[in-house]
Image (cartoon, grey):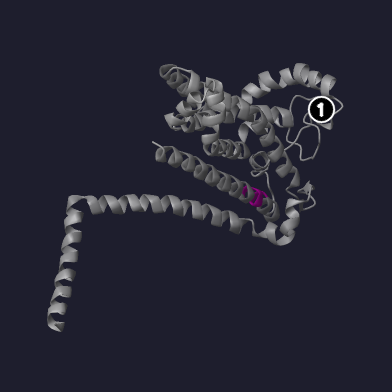
Amino acid sequence: MHASANMTERAALSKAPRAFLHRLRSGDEIAHIITLMFAALVVGITALLVYQLWIQSVLSRQKFGWIFFVTHVWDPLAGQFGALPFLYGTLVTSAIALILAVPLGLGTAIFLSEFSTPRASDIFAFLVDLLAAVPSVIFGLLGIFVMVPWLRTTVEPALQSTLGFLPLFQGPMYGVGFLAAGLILAVMVVPFIVSVSREVLIAVPREQREAALALGATRWEAIWKAVVPFAKTGIIGSVFLALARALGETMAVTMVIGNDPRISASLFAPGYSIAAVIANEFTEATGNLYLSALVELGLVLFMLTFVLNGLARLLVLTTRQRGAGHQ
């Protein structure tokens, strides 16, 4: 019994290299190895990026600790660095962008998926994708030469005359500031909301619409009460993707936000964002501590966008799986 078992094991071991050589000759194993190397390279680059950000920010983390995130002083000459003004500016501009972009993007996605003809929907979707491909510096130039003067002379005076009793709409009107950055970001993130929301709405099973219509609902009621709730997870995922895009935007925001590291309740006031301060000051940074503080800001921004993108992908995938399960 033992002899026969040993012979069987030896035969299996001798067949394994031959099977591997056969797959190697057919190209399957080579393709598997090459694609595995590519996938490992992408993961390795991401890990290396996080590692370098962590190592290069060690001086700032050791000196300031968690106080770095709640300190509003940014004084390179005195060696005092605090991230609070940049966190505030990033969050405020991103919030303004989402408040404006979500209704516009969702409404456009509903029209393209439910009311438009398939041909017109495809054409509009292509144009929306083109809008997403426009370089951010182009949006920044349009913001400087078109939007900022319009805000300074028309929009901000109108807002102050009607809503000036609110702290959000008080103070000097420069044109550049939180409001300008939020508006330019809204234009830039709308294509992400439209594209993803349209896909998840199209993925909703036809039975959802037909069941609501059979119960006597109007077409709009069927869309709003049956289709949209079913695709809610994917729509939220598109909002997360747009938020991640808004948090990381650099050039357009740098050109219209005003670049002033202060915290102000007024949306008319100039501000600063994390991406903008890194772009503006990294090449001028003198001293290891100054560089380390900027790198730590980059680490914070990377982790925020990484987590938000991950959540968005999970939500969109969940919606697609639910739609596939009902087909």
Q: Residue at x 41, y 41 (%)?
A: 325
Q: Is residue 230 left or right of residue 164?
A: left
Residue at the spot 12% in from the left edge and 79% down from the top edge: 4
State the residue at coordinates (59%, 50%).
303
Question: In the structure shown, which secondary structural element does the residue marked by tag 1 occupy?
Answer: helix
Note whether 71 is above or below 135 in the view shown.
Answer: below
Q: Which residues are magenta?
A: 294-298
Q: Is residue 2 left or right of residue 300?
A: left
Q: Position of residue 265 (x, y in %)?
A: 81, 36
Residue 11 in percent (x, y) is at 14, 71
- Predominant secondary structure, magenta span: helix
Height in image: 118 above or below 239?
Answer: above
Could you tell me which quadrant the N terminus lies in? bottom left
Indicate whether 144 appears above or below 269: above
Neighbour class for label 1 at 10 Å: few (<14), some, many (≥20)?
many
**Residue indicated by mark 1:** 169
- Can you see residue 294? yes
Q: Name which residue type carries label 1.
A: Phe
Q: Nearer the viewer, residue 239 or 268?
A: 239
Q: Is residue 277 above or below residue 172?
A: below
Asked if residue 323 lies left or right of residue 17, the reply is right
